[in-house]
Amino acid sequence: MGALGRAFERREIRFAPGSERAYEGAEWRDAIVVVERGEIELEGLHGSRISFASGAVLFLCGLPLRLLRNRGAVPAVLSAISRPHR
């Protein structure tokens, strides 16, 4: 992904194969999230699961999620694009 200028910032979140990360709503506030590589699975509070592959564009703020997981055999990379937090 190219330069964004001063109006936005980009964070890269990496998931090793088989790893998971607890969902923290504040971490995704005001962010558009792109699955850059691999596949990421979202698990809801009641156990429902949905996967998104490379190229998917997501908005993760305020969702009833428990965790994000990489069930694949290759690393997954997310880019979170948001306005700078001041």
Image (cartoon, rainbow, N blue to C red):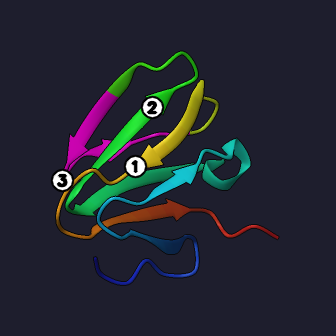
Residue 31 x %, y %: 54, 52
- Give the residues in magenta: 50-60
- From mark 2 to mark 1, how far is it between C-alphas? 8 Å
Q: Is residue 58 magenta?
A: yes
Query: Which quarter of the figure is the C terminus placed in?
Result: bottom right
For residue 34, above or below residue 51: below
Tell me which label, 2 or 1, sits earlier in the chain: 2
Q: Is residue 70 left or right of residue 26?
A: left
Tell me the kind of residue under disc 1.
Arg
- Crowdedness near tag 1: few (<14), some (14–19) or many (≥20) residues, C-alpha within 10 Å: many
Q: Are marks 2 and 1 in contact (CB under 8 Å)?
A: yes
Residue 69 x %, y %: 40, 49
* Residue with the mark numbered 2: 43
For residue 63, above or below residue 34: above
Q: Residue at x 60, y 24 (%)?
A: 64
Q: Residue at x 75, y 67 (%)?
A: 85
Tell me the kind of residue under disc 3.
Gly
- The answer to which of 76 and 73 lies nearer the viewer is 73
For numbered disc 2, what is the local secondary structure?
A: strand
- Crowdedness near tag 3: few (<14), some (14–19) or many (≥20) residues, C-alpha within 10 Å: some
Query: Which quarter of the figure is the N terminus placed in?
Result: bottom left
* Residue with the mark numbered 1: 69
Residue 56 x %, y %: 23, 46
Residue 55 got which mark?
Answer: 3
Q: Is residue 37 magenta?
A: no
For numbered disc 3, what is the local secondary structure?
A: loop
Tell me which label, 1 or 3, sits earlier in the chain: 3
Tell me the kind of residue under disc 2.
Glu
Q: Is residue 76 left or right of residue 14?
A: left
- From mark 3 to mark 2, how far is it between C-alphas? 19 Å
Residue mark closest to the camera, 1 vs 3? 1
- The answer to which of 77 and 80 lies nearer the viewer is 77
